[in-house]
Image (cartoon, coloured by chain):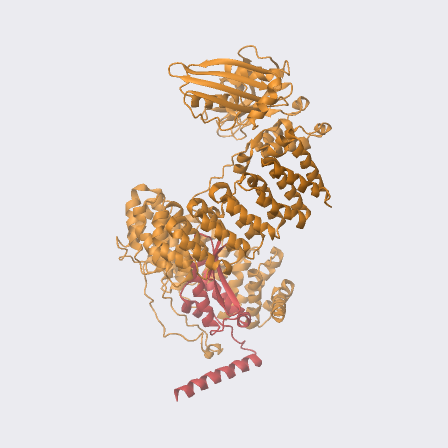
Amino acid sequence: GDIILYDGLLAVYKHSLDLIFYVLAPPAENELMLNVALTAYMDGLSLLLRGQVERRALMDNLDLALLCLDETIDDGIIVETDATTIASRVSRPRADTTEIVINEQTILSAYQTVKEKMAQRIAQM
Amino acid sequence: MASKKDDDASFNNFYNNKTTILQEARVFHESPISPRKCRALLTRVAYLFYSGEAFQAQEATPLFFGITKLFSHKDAALRQMVYLAIKELSTVAEDVIMLTASIQRDMQPNSEVIYRPNAIRALCRIIDASMVQSTERFFKAAIVDKNTSISSAALVSSYHLFPVSKDVIKRWVNEAQEALSPRAPSFFNAPSTSYLGFGSSAPSTPSYQTVPSSSYISQYHALGLLYSIRQQDRMAVIKMIQQLGGGKTGGGTTLKNPMALCMLIRYAAKVMDEDPNMHKQMFDLLEGWLRHKSDMVTFEAARAIAEMRNVQPQHLTRAVAALQNFLSSMKPTLKFAAIRTLSSLALIHPTVVAACNTEMENLITDANRSIATYAITTLLKTGNEASVDRLMKQISGFMSEISDEFKVIVVDAVRSLCLKFPAKQDLMLTFLAGVLRDEGGYDFKRAVVEAIFDMIKYISACKESALGHLCEFIEDCEFTKLSVRILHLLGIEGPKMSQPTKYIRFIYNRVVLENAIVRAAAVSSMAKFGVNVLDATVKKSIGVLLSRCLDDVDDEVRDRAAMYLRVLREEELQETYVKEDSVFSLAALEAKLVSYVNDAAATSEPFDASSIPKISRAQAAQDVARPSSLDTIAVAVTAKAAPVNLAPQLSAAEAQSQYAQQLAAVPEFAAYGPVMNSSVKPTQLTESETEYVVSCVKHVFKAHVVFQFNISNTLPDMVLENVDVIMQPTDETGLTPLGSTSIPLLTAAASPQIAYVSFQRDDPVEYPLGTFQCTLKFVSKEVDPSSGEPEEEGYPDEYQLEEVELGASGDYILPSYVNFNSEWEKMKAGPSQTETFALSEMESIKAACDSLIEILNMEALGGSDQPTSTTVHTLQLGGLVAGGGGKVLARVRMTFAAGQGVTLELSVRAEQEAVCRLVMSAIGG
């Protein structure tokens, strides 16, 4: 199920691997409007997390998830429904200019990128 | 699974620890600032807020001002998170207004930073009404900014601020209007991949590339703000709807955002509801929107039409067709929205909704159980007798797949279906008996058993087989409560059936196999067979079975068996203990018991149950009739449409206990002993819209009568002092005035207040009757409108009230249920009186019955309040005299002849002579 009337509230929800996202609203709201907001948020989040919308990735990038939510809904008002706009408005943290941290994560992501690029090149050939 | 839980716990410990975070907040004061570290900490602060952690002001304020330090760093990624934290902290921290200047710097009209919208949305959280004025310039510029994110942020902030500072924001109407016009995404930078690519983390790229929105959502925000500004001015709202509505077809609208159109539909529906003159025009607009290409708009329009007040079937056709279309959609949200709307519409116009029956039947098996449940409950409202068979088959098919909670809803739906189509009872009963055998919890089984109970009660044709199914069920029932209820029902219904003996076997099996509670219920049930079945052999065998129970290990079972054996031997006991079909009125019993328990002096004597009025079992059953869960579901949907009128109707018992409290506040009345009777409803002594509104309640004590006057002053510019009620009996009443209490000061704000007048009954055995002239006496003073203080000088005044009557009805006699024939015979020996009256004014027997019942305030027994003949009738009445006066019965034989009116012979039998006189005088006087 993706929608239910629960305890006097309208709840629209979606699963993504090991996560469930809910949008709650008063029962008189337009169900489709809530669905649009939920979809916008999840698509935006998916862009930010590069399609890996699951618990570990969400917790590691909680800043992105929270900012993404803030760009979608502000104090009960839907701010934006275009997922690309939402995702593009979320800034990513940068390494501090003074210290460039090289750890397992950054090396891993460098390796991932190289692997992707290589795969693309090979595919093009 | 376990490792996942541990994971969760460690994560929450790390993020949720407020103390750690407050300590780590030193990172904000470090130099140079590390944007990465700060952003990580701010994320954790925001997370704490989102997970419901409560911050104290003294914790949040230093944190808030620590964060303000971060404004000195230009990093955009940090600044965006700073704004998120500010939004949350602003609700708890103090002096947040200090930050206004810093935030305004980020709002500069030509700043191209990514966080400008974030700054705008945070600003509305920290400023107060006095500051709005000074931000006007920024807001006006932002609202019309070509970047829609900035425009939207400014509009949303203005919308949040509107309640705070209406006057300033009303001046932004032109800017909002401009934002409403559609703006094509004006600058489309080559689709930026910066947020996807690896390159963005290079420290040298300072600015972000944002993708302009293609959703036109700022129209939605602009419309919301415009409506807030204009909602008091209906003409402006109508004009706005007409301009934006885009003509009859809706094609000419400039609104491209579907959510904006939904809002417009809501405004149109509201106008339509409030202004009948606009009904036609707005309705045409709504119908036009039904053809919109966005489902969201179509649905909003269809729902607006379905929820119109007093909607007529011919108006609904197109809306229902649109909803019907949605029912076959693949999207659960759309199906849910449509079926929910149809479900509440089916309450008013089932025939219109019936057009969707085929689609709804397909939804019964929907994976989303909410949709399936709505489908079933709606079908049961719209279905006709012919479709029931198919429907039942489908329901049986999926009963095993759903949870108990849904099963209960389905069983309730079937239950109301049985009552709607009694001809289908066979099918329904088979279904219910089938599910009764299924696995299930108590709530589910109870729902099924209650459904069968209802069938037994309302559909006599199915009694025999329904009882059979219940008998089978108790053979293997794990719920004691249900077994006891079924045994009780078998005891009542079983003896009336053609073969009572076959039930006795099932019942006796319980005595052998079950726990003590069920065994006791089985004993009582068997005794009912012994008394009510006429066959002497049955009586004998019941006697044998009961005597076996005398050896039971449980004392309750033994006691019951012993008692019923005696009852079986002695005819007259049967009347009282088995055949008795009246019960105490529980509300009255409760009220009396509460006052008995609260009154310390009363406990010296045993509780007197004889003064509690009785009601028949049928009446008692009506009082507890439970609402079907179908109705409750429907209410949940429509609750917002109809503002529920919750004006509490005080029940008689509640009123009594309220009076008792009021009387207890006057110390003089304590000596009068307990109240024997108070009138159920106050009598109005004035019109309801006069300057002074007065109502009277009469309280009868053992030797006293107290009149309670509830007095309201409805004039706010007057105060009344020393308010008294003067009562003057019109003739000899048998009452001696004792005294009265007056109201020292009565203002409109503190109304109503109570004044009492009390009398002594000269002869406590007699029931004094009489009429009193009442006058309100007071000193009235005008209130000075400027100071609100009453003036020094007042003048005495009087105000004539209507007469108060102390009569038999309501003051002494209460209706009570008894078995008339047997009681009438029993009271033959007691005091009785018979008199004949001619009521020449009465126009029919029925009218005479009604007025007698009203005058005497007694219960009509055996359905005798509905005369079957127009010329001859006998009315049987039963009542209870307040304060231990005992039972009173009246038999009224009436004849009617045109021209002569009704002639009646009234016979009264009571336990006291005075009561007979009371009843006679009520008619004669």
Outermost residue toward the top in this view = B732
Q: Quadrant of the N terminus of chain B?
A: bottom right
Q: Percent x, y for residue B924?
A: 51, 13
Q: Is residue B108 left or right of residue B286?
A: right
Q: Is residue B185 above or below residue B501?
A: below
Quadrant of residue B299 within the rendered picture: bottom left
Q: Which chain is orange?
A: B
Residue A120 seen: yes
**Whether residue B738 is visible:** no
- Residue B84 vs B130, above or below: the answer is below
Task: Classify residue B421 as left or right of residue B588.
Answer: left
Please state which of residues B449 and B313 is positioned toward the viewer in this rendering. Answer: B449
Q: Residue at x 60, y 55 (%)?
A: B57
Residue B786 x %, y %:
49, 30
Q: Nearer the viewer, residue B804 or B263?
A: B804
Residue occupying image coordinates x 40% and y 14%: B900
The shade of chain A is red
Where is residue B214? Give x, y as percent. Answer: 36, 66
Rendering coords of residue B459 (x, y %): 47, 42
